[in-house]
Image (tube, helix red, strand yellow):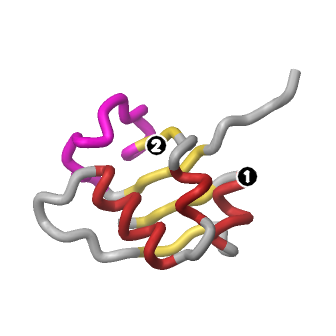
Amino acid sequence: MLIRYFAAARGAAGIAEETVAVPDGAAVADVAALLAARHPGLDRVLTRCSFLLDEVAVRDVSAPATGAMLDVLPPFAGG
């Protein structure tokens, strides 16, 4: 699965994107835990992030992580 990081998530991960192997039956929350284990410091950001799975908002992180791309979006500020 292609993981794309934005803003503070990109800073915490230290990369803009990566490809990770997602186990069959994994939920979005499982993928987030996998990412936190790979990138120290990302766990603090992930607790506040929203996720898009194949460009569709994920409302429930227990939803299956079936898709080709997961975007990790921290809260954005601005006006």
52 vs 74, left or right, is left
List x then y, in percent, for residue 65: 25, 52
Q: What's drawn in magenta, residue-wise?
A: 53-67
- Please name the residue shown 30% across and 33% down the image: 60
On residue 7, which mark appears? Answer: 1
Callout 1: SS: helix
Q: Main secondary structure of the magenta part?
A: loop
Q: Return the x and y of residue 62 as percentages of the image width and height.
A: 24, 42
Three-letter amino acid code at disc 2? Answer: Phe
First along the sequence among labels 1 and 2: 1
Mark 2 neighbour class, 10 Å CA radius: few under 14, some 14 to 19, many 20 or more: many
Q: Position of residue 16 (x, y in %)?
A: 65, 67
Q: For the residue labelled by badge 2, is the local secondary structure a helix, a strand or a loop?
A: strand
In the orientation shown, which residue stands out farthest toward the left?
Answer: 25
> Which quadrant of the figure has residue 61?
top left
The circle drawn on residue 26 is: none
Quadrant that contains the C terminus: top right
Q: Quadrant of the N terminus?
A: bottom left
Closer to us: 76 or 55: 76
Q: Which residue is mark 2?
A: 51
Q: Amino acid at mark 1?
A: Ala
Residue at image point 51% right, 46% down: 47
Residue appearing at x 57%, y 41% in the figure: 48
Q: Quadrant of residue 76?
A: top right
Residue 51 to residue 57: above or below: below
As displayed, is residue 77 above or below residue 38?
Answer: above
Relative horizontal placement of residue 65, taking residue 70 as reference (left or right): left
Alpha-carbon span between mark 1 and mark 2: 13 Å
